[in-house]
């Protein structure tokens, strides 16, 4: 895990980097520039087909909450299984 100092340095470098040069490059030019790095490999189409999308826990909870929200509301707009707020008074 990177240290706070390493993260701050990476953030500083990202802010100072001339992204317009990178944005102007084509995908082929980017691949050519990274070709020297033997640790950097692009996944093949077959490898991409095998990848599984894994959503972070927070995103999974939000999706589950969004799916559950319509089921918890009755057709009259009140929550199912709970008395209306007026009944509690």
Image (cartoon, grey):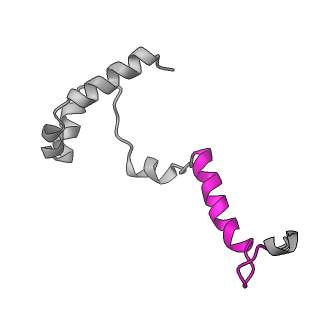
Residue 41 visible in this rendered orientation of the protein = yes
Looking at the figure, which quarter contains the C terminus? bottom right
Residue drawn at x 20%, y 30% as measured from the top left: 17
Image location of residue 20, percent across then percent down: 14, 41
Q: In this rendering, would 89 be left or right of 19? A: right
Image location of residue 24, percent across then percent down: 13, 45
Q: In this rendering, would 33 be left or right of 55? A: left
Residue 38 visible in this rendered orientation of the protein = no
12 vs 39, nearest the viewer: 12
16 vs 45, nearest the viewer: 16
Image location of residue 40, percent across then percent down: 34, 31
Query: Which residue is farthest front?
Result: 89
Quarter of the view holding residue 82: bottom right
Q: In this rendering, would 38 be left or right of 74? A: left
Residue 72 versus residue 17 in the image, above or below: below
* Magenta segment, prevailing SS (helix, strand or loop): helix
Residue 40 versus residue 83 in the image, above or below: above
44 vs 66, nearest the viewer: 66
Residue drawn at x 72%, y 84% as measured from the top left: 75
54 inside magenta stretch: no
Q: How many marks?
A: 0
85 vs 57, nearest the viewer: 85
66 inside magenta stretch: yes
Query: Which residue is farthest bottom?
Result: 76
Residue drawn at x 44%, y 50% as measured from the top left: 48
Image location of residue 56, percent across then percent down: 57, 45
Query: Which portion, as a residue range, is magenta?
Result: 56-79
Residue 50 versus residue 88 in the image, above or below: above
């Amino acid at each position: 895990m990177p240290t706070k100092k390493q993260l701050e340095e990476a953030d500083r470098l990202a802010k100072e980097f001339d992204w317009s040069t990178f944005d102007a490059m084509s995908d082929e030019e980017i691949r050519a520039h990274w070709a020297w790095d033997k640790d950097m490999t692009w996944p093949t189409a077959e490898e991409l087909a095998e990848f599984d999308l894994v959503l972070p826990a927070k995103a999974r909870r939000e999706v589950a909450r969004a799916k559950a929200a319509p089921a918890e509301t009755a057709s009259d707009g009140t929550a199912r299984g709970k008395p209306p707020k007026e009944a509690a008074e």
